[in-house]
């Protein structure tokens, strides 16, 4: 399709090849293939248990894989980890942990600070800028136990921003967040994309998935479809992704109907 | 504005800590003094008092060993315990401390003597094997961590007990000191033990200071730390290794059964006193050292007093002090706040009833009779007389014989409460679609806690409506300023 160019083609930002993951011998991801370039905002959607979280954890080497490989800019994760950012699910940490918002955001700098060293003034400034971006600067000195769900989610986003990465994996950054916060998070994600970052975002809501992301990865144990949203968000592909789940199907139908798509 | 808030916050927590510190010190003193008194006359010829003097002068080498030993082991356990508690690993500490016992026996069997280094190595290895078993059980079976911990704890402890009882029957063995590992005896700490303790404590402090950032990151969010390339596995395993080593150095003074309390209790106390991790760790280490020293001192006062239980009791007493007197969420503070709230609500309800009586009479009279109030509240005259007297004491009303009249302050507050009640009722029916007969009980609670800012907002949203859903007038701010009803200077009855 693409005409060959004279200059050597740079390796893709992320390339996943035949990735397979199993928990206690039960496969949760099977032969995932995917290649993507810079500046893309990718939504990962699929039913519960489809392996969405597992996929992004496997990409960062957080779960053992049974086969296949993941390369970033043609190199394994271990060599380029500092250029990859992560927003885990909000429930994975104890929000009663005795640290402040600022402390958590600074943790995003730890990867680049290096062992035995303390965060510098520059790191603090960077963390403040990230808090400003998610509109949490006035909360910098608050204990994290005093935050609402939406604020917790934005703290995690600010921590990821502090990583100053080029590829981001975000696990349900919109879970338990009100509409206004969701809109502000989306605008942060778009800013990152426009700067050339590639973002993978696990998402649950189909109607908004269509609005938010320019690429979609439909996942159910393996890749059902991956491509530009306009091409992939079709009734047939969504039905294949979600199987016979009636409630979700009706949701899909509604989402397509609202957009004037095929019925 | 920002800076102002920071300063206030900092000052507040300093004050809170100050108060809590005084409270705990008082409690600790209260606990120590009777002991000292009881012990002093106990020995013949004031031997107890002599023991106190001997302990305090630190001239005796044995006493110095005990003092340094308990300070070191208490501080070390407190420091690592702080991390343990914020990581919700308290039960791991319990399992670890029991799992080391077979290692103690093995270390003894190594060269048939109580060699501290051999015992440290053996016990630490046993502890780590125990925790490795726990994580292997969690990974490979459907068992959850609590069951795995309980199982490993009991099995390892049983093996240790068997080995110890066998050792004590061995003809060649000089097993005299081994029973100390069960219940603890600080007096048994010798110079060789002290050297091992100092080394372990030094390594622990160095580890925490050098890798503080990584420890915190791994404790808070291990997956994120790993995704950044931090050496999460190394930090975790090093932490578990040092935890095991700290448990082992505390064993001799505290005993296997209770050593986990030295990990948990000072850290739990610190957890109640602060919400900053760095402070929490310092407090936990200090409280651990205080508990160690206090327990050693108490056990010194009489023959046969076991150090371990006394160390744990001192730690528990400081914890009890923090629970009772902690200014952040102590029981006393809570009880006080709640009591104050109950009294205020009762007085405000009396004022509201007075307002209702006065309102029905068109605010024509300066005072209302107790009779009228009793009818309104469906209470006896004697009951409302007590309520009136309470208002009198608080300067909200004047009670003269059977006549109750508002003071200016009481009149203002009564108007505010009625206004809050009626505003809230109107808000619920208009904006939250409550039926008019459903709103009273909600308003009864909310009227006492609505602040002025919330009232302004409600008035704005309700377009300064004048009447509540039941048709009664909502007193406005101007009404509260203007009317002089209910004052003694008004029309007398």
Image (tube, coloured by chain):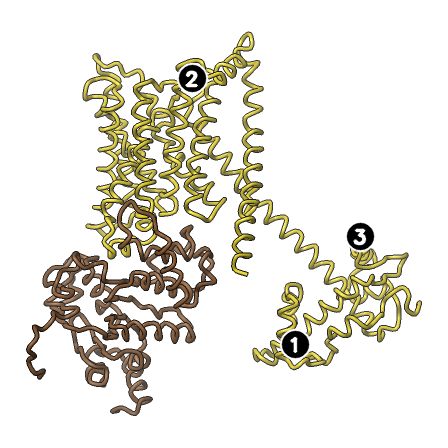
Chain colours: A brown, B yellow
Coordinates of residue B111 in the picture (x, y in percent) = 19, 18
Q: Which residue is mark 2?
A: B63
Residue B144 left/right relative to A95: left
| Residue B459 numbered mark, or none | 1
Measure the C-alpha gap from mark 2 to mark 3: 59 Å
| Residue B393 numbered mark, or none | 3
Identify the subunit bearing mark 2: B
Numbered disc 1: secondary structure = helix
Quadrant showing the C terminus of chain B: bottom right
**Precedes in sequence: disc 2 or disc 3:** 2
Q: Dot 1: within a 10 Å radius of its alpha carbon, few (fewer than 14), some, or many (20 or more) residues?
A: some
Coordinates of residue B207 in the picture (x, y in percent) = 30, 38
Q: Dot 3: within a 10 Å radius of its alpha carbon, few (fewer than 14), some, or many (20 or more) residues?
A: few
Measure the C-alpha gap from mark 3 to mark 1: 33 Å
Numbered disc 2: secondary structure = helix
Q: Residue at x 31, y 23 (%)?
A: B195
Near-viewer residue (A98 or A8): A8
**Precedes in sequence: disc 3 or disc 1:** 3
Near-viewer residue (B17 or B266): B17
B60 vs B244: above or below: above
Badges 3 and 1, same chain = yes
A233 vs A148: above or below: below
Q: Residue at x 43, y 68 (%)?
A: A135
Coordinates of residue B356 in the picture (x, y in percent) = 78, 70
A209 vs B354: above or below: below
Identify the subunit bearing mark 3: B
**Precedes in sequence: disc 1 or disc 2:** 2
Q: Residue at x 43, y 64 (%)?
A: A136
């Amino acid at each position: 399709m693409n005409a060959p160019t004279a200059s050597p083609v740079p390796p893709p930002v992320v390339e996943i090849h035949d990735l397979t993951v199993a928990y206690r011998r039960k496969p949760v991801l099977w032969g995932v293939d995917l290649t993507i370039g810079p500046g893309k905002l990718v939504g990962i959607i699929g039913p519960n248990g489809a392996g969405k979280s597992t996929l992004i954890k496997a990409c960062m080497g957080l779960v053992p894989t049974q086969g296949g490989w993941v390369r970033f800019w043609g190199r394994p994760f271990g060599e380029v980890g500092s250029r990859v950012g992560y927003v885990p699910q909000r429930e994975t940490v104890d929000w009663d942990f005795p640290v402040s918002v600022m402390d958590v955001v600074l943790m995003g700098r730890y990867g680049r600070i290096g062992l035995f060293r303390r965060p510098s003034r520059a790191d603090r400034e960077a963390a403040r800028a990230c808090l400003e971006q998610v509109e949490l600067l006035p909360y910098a000195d608050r204990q994290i136990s005093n935050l609402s769900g939406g604020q917790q989610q934005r703290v995690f986003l600010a921590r990821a921003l502090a990583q100053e990465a080029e590829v981001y994996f975000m696990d349900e950054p919109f879970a338990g967040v009100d509409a206004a916060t969701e809109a502000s998070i989306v605008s942060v994600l778009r800013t990152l994309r426009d700067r050339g970052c590639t973002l993978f975002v696990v998402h649950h809501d189909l109607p908004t998935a269509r609005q938010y992301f320019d690429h979609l990865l439909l996942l159910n144990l393996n890749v059902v479809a991956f491509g530009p949203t306009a091409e992939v968000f079709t009734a047939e592909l969504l039905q294949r992704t979600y199987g016979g789940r009636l409630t979700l199907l009706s949701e899909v139908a509604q989402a397509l109907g609202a957009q004037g798509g095929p019925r | 504005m920002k800076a102002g808030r920071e300063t206030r916050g900092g000052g507040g927590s300093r004050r809170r800590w100050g108060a809590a510190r005084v409270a705990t010190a008082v409690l600790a003193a209260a606990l120590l003094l009777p002991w000292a008194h009881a012990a002093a006359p106990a020995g013949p010829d004031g031997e107890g008092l002599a023991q106190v003097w001997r302990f305090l002068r630190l001239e005796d080498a044995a006493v110095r060993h005990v003092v340094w030993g308990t300070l070191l082991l208490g501080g070390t356990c407190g420091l690592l315990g702080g991390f343990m508690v914020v990581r919700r690993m308290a039960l791991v500490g319990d399992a670890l401390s029991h799992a080391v016992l077979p290692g103690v026996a093995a270390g003894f069997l190594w060269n048939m003597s109580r060699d501290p280094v051999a015992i440290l190595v053996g016990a630490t290895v046993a502890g780590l094997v125990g925790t490795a078993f726990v994580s292997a059980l969690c990974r490979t079976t459907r068992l959850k961590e609590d069951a795995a911990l309980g199982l490993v704890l009991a099995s390892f402890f049983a093996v240790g007990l068997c080995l110890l009882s066998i050792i004590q029957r061995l003809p060649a063995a000089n097993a005299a000191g081994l029973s100390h590992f069960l219940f603890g005896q600080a007096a048994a700490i010798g110079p060789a033990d002290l050297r091992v303790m100092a080394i372990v404590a030094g390594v622990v402090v160095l580890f925490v200071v050098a890798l503080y950032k990584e420890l915190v990151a791994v404790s808070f969010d291990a997956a994120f730390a790993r995704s950044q390339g931090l050496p999460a596995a190394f930090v975790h395993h090093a932490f578990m290794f040092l935890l095991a080593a700290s448990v082992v150095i505390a064993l001799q003074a505290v005993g296997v059964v209770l050593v986990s309390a030295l990990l948990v209790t000072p850290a739990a106390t610190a957890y109640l006193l602060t919400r900053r991790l760095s402070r929490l760790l310092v407090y936990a280490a200090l409280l651990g050292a205080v508990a160690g020293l206090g327990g050693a001192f108490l056990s010194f006062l009489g023959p046969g007093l076991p150090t371990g239980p006394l160390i744990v009791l001192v730690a528990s007493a400081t914890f009890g002090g923090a629970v009772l007197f902690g200014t952040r969420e102590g029981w006393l503070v809570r009880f006080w706040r709640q009591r104050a709230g109950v009294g205020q609500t009762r007085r405000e309800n009396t004022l509201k009833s007075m307002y209702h009586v006065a309102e029905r009479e068109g605010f024509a009279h300066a005072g209302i009779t107790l009779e009228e109030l009793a009818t309104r509240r469906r209470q006896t005259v004697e009951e409302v007389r007590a309520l009136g007297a309470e208002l009198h004491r608080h300067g909200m009303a004047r009670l003269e014989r059977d006549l109750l009249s508002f003071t200016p302050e009481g009149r203002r507050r009564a108007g505010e409460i009625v206004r809050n009640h009626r505003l809230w009722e109107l808000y619920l029916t208009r904006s939250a679609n409550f039926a008019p007969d459903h709103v009273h009980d909600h308003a009864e609670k909310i009227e006492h806690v609505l602040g002025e800012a919330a009232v302004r907002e409600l008035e704005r949203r309700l377009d300064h409506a004048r009447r509540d859903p039941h048709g009664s007038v909502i007193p406005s701010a101007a009404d509260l300023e203007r009317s002089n009803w209910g004052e003694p200077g008004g029309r007398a009855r």
